Structure formats: C-alpha cells, structure tokens
Amino acid sequence: MTILFVAALLIVVVVVFGPRPRLGEPPGDPNVPQVDDLTDLAAWLREKEASVPGLIDGADARVVFANPDTPAKTELCFVYIHGFSATWPETAPVTSRIAETFGANVLQARLAGHGVGHEPMTTPAEAWLESMLETWRVARQLGNEIVLVATSTGAPLAIWLATRAETAGAIKAMLFMSPNFGIRSKFDFLLTMPWSRYWIHWFIGRVREWAPQSELEAKYWTWKYSTLSLIEMQKVVDWCNAQAARRFTWPLAMMYMKNDPTVDPAKAIRFFERWGGRTKALIPVTLDGEVAQHVFAGDITAPHRTDWAVQQFTTFLSRLG
C-alpha cells in the first residue's frame, strides 16, 4: 500500500511540476539586407517568399509602396500582422486603406508556417518570433516610424516585438482587431500545462477542423491542423499576459466584438485596462455588433465594416499628431 501511495504521489508530482510549454527565444537572427534602393528590398522579400515550399498564391509577405513609380521611405510604415492560422488578406484592405490616408508604405507580414499548403501550422511559436524580427528589419527601412496593425494572435506578437530593444522609440502606435489575450474556451489553461502535448488530445482531439464560408476563406486560412499547434499559440498568449502591461506606453486603439466566438473579449478589455499608456481607445464594434464574428472587417469576411474600421483607426491616428 505504501509503495502504491508513493508511486501515485510521484506521478502527481511529475504531472503537476513537470516542464510547461513556455515561449522561448527566436531560433535564429534574421539577416535582412540594408539597401539604398528600396526596390531591391522588395525584390529580396519576393524571392525569399518564393522559395517557401507550398506557399499559397497571394499569401506571401510583401511590400506595398505608397508611390510605386518612385519608391521611397515614408514617414510612417504600416505593418500588418495576421492572426493564428490566417494570412494577411484576412482583413484586407483595412491596413492599406489607412496607409493611403497617411501616404505610407505598407508591409504585409507572414508568420512562419502560415499560408502554406505543405505541412501547415507545424512550426513552433519561436519561429513566429523570428518572422517578427525579420518583419521589423524590413519595415524599419520603409518608414521612419512604424504602426503595428494586428488581428487576434498577431496582437500579442506585436507586443513581443515592441518589447525588443531594437524597436525602441520607433513605434508610432498599435492598432488591434479582436486581439487574442485569451481564447473563448474552458480548456485554454490546459494547453500549457506540464506535458500537455502528450495528453491534450484527450480533451480537444488531435485535429482541429472548421468549415470555411467561402473560397477565399478556404484559400487564405488553414482550416485543418493538429491541435498541438494550439499549444504554440497559447505560449504566445501566456507570455503576453505575464507581462506588466502598465509599462506599455505606446498609443493603442483596440477593437473588439462582444460576441466574438474565438477570443474572449472580456480578457481583451482587462488587458486594455492594464495598459499603461494614456493615449488609448477601446472601440467596440457597433456596426452590426450583435453578430458573433471574429474577423469583423475586410473584403473576405465582412466588407460592410471595412469603411467603419478604417475611419475609426484613421481618426485615432490623426489625433496623435
């Protein structure tokens, strides 16, 4: 009996106090060329993306110049960071429309493992961090100051990027849509429990799959993937929620839908309230606001709210001076 008790106790100790999935550092240090001619930078990015196996047409990271005929560094550069399992067209043309108002260049980012038809969503979260560093080093050559626009899990990734020493003093503002500071699930806390990759399928299955509502949604989202990739997503969220948000002073505009079926808006609101900067705006989606929708603007899922979202963000940025 004593032996059984000790064995059971050891199992409990191993399970409870075992290694938890935690966000680490990027596996590499991206080497982005420093150029005199920005067309060379855009060409470098095109070639790099073209080398990615199975990259879906139109999902590639890309530079959009404010003036394609005479590309030049602009005062602002808008960087769009897409959400987990998505790609940058998810909310397009919101970011480009805002950038046009300010005569700014745009960088549409792509996270590692996203937008590919070959083994999608199999990269660790740390590879996404490396993507963020590469994105920054491209964007910094495109604009004197950077506006980070992010949807869902792109938001905590934007915050991670903003905390890096090399970004200091160069971020103009952050614009978040449906930020992921906690998913709407009773099992979210289990994702980063000790040894979770070995038993999480007991609770959420081995594969996550959902039905796209259009051909474009099917094209630009990964709608079937291993549930182990959710652990990677949760690592990013956990890291962000562990930060002292009161020390974040970047101007922030945050949009949310109260009936968001994917992320918990209450958690987003609490994070916003902890945000230390005084220049911030919490913007509930009021246009058709009772609908349960996560990606609430853009041509693919909600074109009727695109103008509204662009106007709200443009007004916020205009007040910054």
Image (cartoon, grey):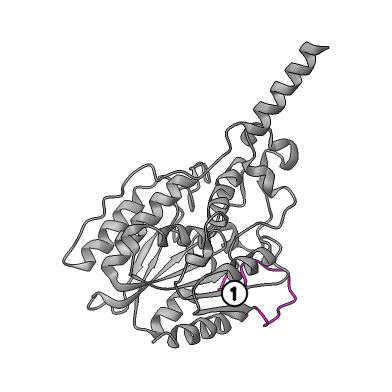
Q: Left or right: where does residue 171 sit relative to residue 220?
A: left
| 98 is within the stretch colored magenta | no
The quadrant in which the N terminus is found is top right
For label 1, count other residues whose C-alpha is less than 10 Å away and answer few (under 14), some (14-19) or many (20+). Answer: many
**Quadrant the C terminus occupies:** bottom left
Q: Nearer the viewer, residue 310 or 42?
A: 310
Q: In the displayed orientation, state which residue is furthest to the front.
A: 2
Within the image, what quadrant is residue 8 found in? top right
Q: Amino acid at mark 1?
A: Met
- Seen at 51% across and 81% down, the residue is 313
Residue 216 x %, y %: 57, 63
Residue drawn at (32%, 65%) of the image: 139
For the record, the magenta segment spans 285-304
Image location (x, y in percent) of residue 247? 47, 65
Say which of 57 and 264 sits in front: 264
Q: Secondary structure at mark 1?
A: strand
Find disc 1 in the rendering and name its residue: 255
**Depicted 152 relative to depicted 93: above or below:** above
The answer to whether residue 54 of the structure is visible from this angle is no
Q: Is residue 2 left or right of residue 37?
A: right
Residue farthest toward the right in the current orientation of the protein: 1
Q: Position of residue 174 (x, y in %)?
A: 46, 71
Quarter where residue 164 is shown:
bottom left
The total of numbered circles placed on residues is 1
